[in-house]
Image (spheres, coloured by chain):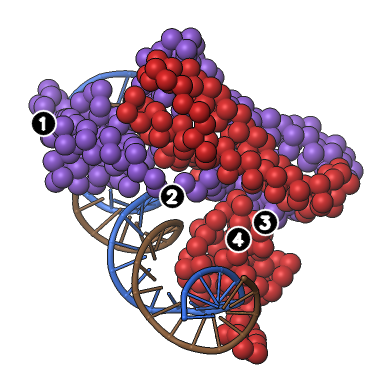
Chain colours: A red, B purple, C brown, D blue
Amino acid sequence: MALRYAIMTALIEDELSGYDLAGSFDKSLGFFWHASHQQIYRELGKLSDLAWVTRRTEAQKGRPDKILYALTDAGREALDEWVLTKDRMRLQETKDELYIKLYNLSESNIDYLRTRLRERREAMMQRLYLYERIRRRHYGDPETLPLRRKGVYLALLGGITGGKQYLAWCDEALELLAGAAEDTSTAAKADTA
Amino acid sequence: MALRYAIMTALIEDELSGYDLAGSFDKSLGFFWHASHQQIYRELGKLSDLAWVTRRTEAQKGRPDKILYALTDAGREALDEWVLTKDRMRLQETKDELYIKLYNLSESNIDYLRTRLRERREAMMQRLYLYERIRRRHYGDPETLPLRRKGVYLALLGGITGGKQYLAWCDEALELLAGAAEDTSTAAKADTA
DNA sequence: CTCTTCATGTAAATCGTTACATGATTCG
DNA sequence: CGAATCATGTAACGATTTACATGAAGAG
């Protein structure tokens, strides 16, 4: 049910097409709730049926027509209600396959898993740069933001602190496994870039 | 596909029933990959069909029979192979409804969201106590652990550092929203326990 | 006597991923 | 000429949740 409300949230300020939304919800909400375009189109269909959004076709030269969606008053109401519903809050379900793989750590896969850890470290670093750029550009002084933007800032902050933690964890993991590697193979191989 | 391998991972060291597995995979793996009993029973059925696990019924006095599952050599092989497969690694998909709700922060829901934040803070604190207890009891000196247990330790460490980060984020969020509350209502209300 | 725990399952619905399909435009 | 981008969708499958269903034991 949350995807539905994530989409409506993205439509509060702008009229957007399914394609726009799939482009990671304007590069913002998408960081916190990814969805594929198929899911989004399906959900937009349902939202239309509920009359929580309206559709408007916009012709374009040389491009397929755009279908722009806008939030209705009823949708806005439903969204406001949803925010106040106490849904299951199942505390941070990490659901990361890498953890399961780590449970199976052995000499035959340690090199592989170290490579995966390095990859993730790199990917998270990239994402953190992006988050920090957004933070500096738009949320320099959080205390002075209007209330709604404070909420958006807090989500971003969650992404930032979570990302930093993840980096630190990768480093600690790599360190521990580097020590373990010396037990395994006699020759110390250089970085596998 | 990952649930399947999570189950097999839990079966490496013990023979377990579906019920045991549903009890959060022996309180360990379950922290990192929760699944309901329905999912587990279904997956165990498939694993039996594949001959990756064997079933053995154990009668009990006054209790329903237990069906105990054990990993076969073929299952063990499949698991080892899976660890080495490069699956989609879609970097930490936070997927937390609270973030979406925070995007909708307003004066009409700020009290509600602050309560939710406090709840989560409390719940995460409880979980952290548990993690730390396990850590002290079983993983006091990680450097000296055998390789496989180092992997398990790293998963636990991920849970711990992630949890601490989450606590810190809750605190920062509550602080920012406490400041915001004073703008909203003239009278400062005491804690809403 | 009721609630919780142990122990297994079926059924239905929704959520999410992967693959397929179309068709024009722009960039290299 | 081939690949990427824009823009929409269908179909099939797999993953996950929620509800329904049974039945005995033990605790309060």
Measured as percent of width and height from the top left, residue B13 is found at 25, 22
Give the residue at x 58% y 72%: A19
How many residues crowd around disc 1 within 10 Å: few (fewer than 14), some, or many (20 or more)?
some
Give the labeled residue for mark 2. Answer: B88
| Residue holding disc 4 | A24
**How far across and how far down the image is residue A92, in percent?**
53, 38
On whether disc 4 and disc 1 are found on a single subunit, the reply is no
The CA span between labels 4 and 2 is 18 Å
Same-chain status of marks 3 and 1: no
| Mark pair 1, 2: CA separation | 35 Å
| Contact? badges 4 and 3 (CB < 8 Å) | yes
Of mark 1 and mark 2, the one earlier in the sequence is 1
Q: Mark 4 belongs to which amino acid?
A: Ser
Q: Position of residue A68 (x, y in %)?
A: 63, 79
> Tags 4 and 1 in contact by the CB under 8 Å rule?
no
Q: Amino acid at mark 1?
A: Arg
Mark 3 surroundings within 10 Å by alpha-carbon count, few (fewer than 14), some (14 through 19), many (20 or more): some
- Kindly identify which chain the residue marked by label 2 belongs to: B
Residue tagged 1: B56
Which residue is depicted at the point 37% across and 14% down?
Answer: B146
Of tags 4 and 1, which is closer to the observer?
4
Q: Which quarter of the figure has residue A154?
A: top right
| Of the pair B144 and D24, the residue shown nearer to us | B144
> What kind of element bears circle 1?
strand
Check the residue under mark 1 and report the chain it is in: B
Distance, label 3 to label 2, CA atoms, is 22 Å
Look at label 3 and name its amino acid. Ser
Look at mark 3 in the image and give the residue it sits on.
A28
Could you classify mark 4 by the number of other residues whose Cα lies within 10 Å: few (under 14), some (14-19), or many (20 or more)? some
A70 left or right, relative to B108:
left
For the residue pair A150 and B53, the one nearer the viewer reads as B53
Q: Nearer the viewer, mark 1 or mark 2?
A: 2
